[in-house]
Amino acid sequence: MTEETPTVDMEKIVSLCRRRGFIFPSSEIYGGLSSCWDYGPLGVELKQNIKQAWRRAVIQERDDMVGLDASILMHPQVWAASGHLEGFSDPLVECQNCHQRFRPDQVAMTKYGDPPSYFTAPDEGQLALKLSRAGFMRANVKFLNFLDYKDKAPCPFCEVVGQFTDPRQFNLMFKTFMGPVEDEASVVYLRPETAQGMFVNFQNIVNTARKRLPFGIAQIGKAFRNEITTGNFIFRSREFEQMEIEFFVKPGTDEEWFNYWTEERLNWYVRLGIKRENLRLREHSKGELAHYARKCLDIDYRFPMGWSELEGVANRGDFDLVQHAKHSGRSMDYYDDETKEHFVPYVIEPSAGVDRSALAVLCDAYDEEPDKDEIRVLLRFHPTVAPIKIAVLPLSRKEPLAAFAREIHTSLRRHWMITYDDTQSIGRRYRRQDEIGTPLCVTVDFQSLEDNQVTIRERDTMNQIRVPVAVLKETLQAKLEGEDLFVLPEGGQIWKEEKT
Ligand code: GAP
């Protein structure tokens, strides 16, 4: 496998998600709504586990972070101050033959593979094109000299050559109206990032949370962007969820904190079970930087369509606080009582997507292995993100076995998200749990009624051990926490499952 080889086919992920109830197209019975997705029963749990792991790592286990849940609708001045009203746009061109609209970089790239030889962009543009072909951010495409090739380029949709309009800027914010009157004065926007909620609450938090610099605010929430083109499943959609940190530091210490957070965030993905070789860091060139950023680095994942951004870490300097001070007339100064100085803090922003994290986790966990004449499909989820941690599987529906298994199910569900399945053969039930990534199954058989022991079966190794019910909870806990050295409880046995 080379650096560029995708690890899994996107079609397989989409199909599994659909089949097993992770993710459905939105409003499917009406033909779906482009680039909007509904998370089904397992998808909800997966997303929730990712968000919980993030909250634990960036808030619960730290002294220097606090949470926030700001509203999605904000005062329109927020977007004037942040630069989004003016600058949060993509260039858009229209084919005058078929009236489809594209970002200029997509005209050269779509389905033709490499850019045509007449494409003569400056180096920066070549880089941008290459990056955007791999699904990178809009900042990359600003530098493409579309005018140089628009008369020679075929439309990616109708294939008619040279019918493109000149590019015009298209603002990506969704507009709506506040109150009953739909006029300019009542326009509000759905937030395109959660970040601004944290900047405008900076002083509220300094004054109430008793935090001194350096400290951060962390927020998870929906963001909306009217992307010109979307795609690659949940990778780029118009409604998505972000997990963002704004970490406020003393100017001069920003470089050090930037490096710290890059490392910290990269390691978080590894702790979530993502293979290190499928992650990389990529620094933005000067031309690619967003309007607010002094420095920016992407944490990329090797998605099925190639290396693409999973999270961005940016040094936003004092851009946002200064802008909000200007536009609101309220001071954003911080008073350092040790040095007796007033200053506007710099901000380091690690900004991650929940949906992209879910997609990365799914792709990374997907595996297939031969199983006699069939293929065993499994999601090797880390227990932290697995939607269902344990499945309780009685070998029969007959009493008193069923009641015994139900009792075990009831006692375990207090601790974890678990399931109970008494349909079909045990082999099929194992395969179903493998495919949704359940790390452990507890099998209850007739022998259990006599010796009060049950079988624990592991998804990855298919190893089975038999344990007394009295120590079942502790044993499962140890296994879910990844204990390697597993000491068999007294009277237990270990064996490898025979493939069916
Ligand atoms: N506050 C900075 C900011 O919003 P960004 O790079 O535009 O930066 C941060 O977005 C993260 O949000 C991205 O790394 C990605 O994970 C996620 N994201 C951005 N646009 C997205 C979209 N259209 N669909 C899904 N996720 C998106």
Image (cartoon, rainbow, N blue to C red):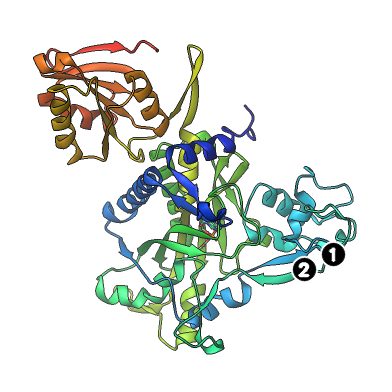
Please tell me which residue lies in front, 411 or 137. 411
List x then y, in percent, for residue 346: 45, 69
Is any part of residue 485 visible from this angle? no
Q: Is residue 66 left or right of residue 361?
A: left
Is any part of residue 234 visible from this angle? yes
Q: Which residue is mark 2?
A: 167
**Residue 143's image quarter?**
bottom right
In the displayed structure, 75 sits above or below 380; it is: below
In the displayed structure, 198 sits above or below 401; it is: below
Of the numbered discs 1 and 2, the one sitting upstream in the chain is 1
List x then y, in percent, for residue 78: 48, 79
Q: Amino acid at mark 2?
A: Pro
List x then y, in percent, for residue 23: 46, 46
The N terminus: image quadrant: top right
Q: Which residue is mark 1?
A: 147
Residue positioned 28% across, 17% down in the render: 464
Q: Amino acid at mark 1?
A: Leu
Image disc number at residue 420: none
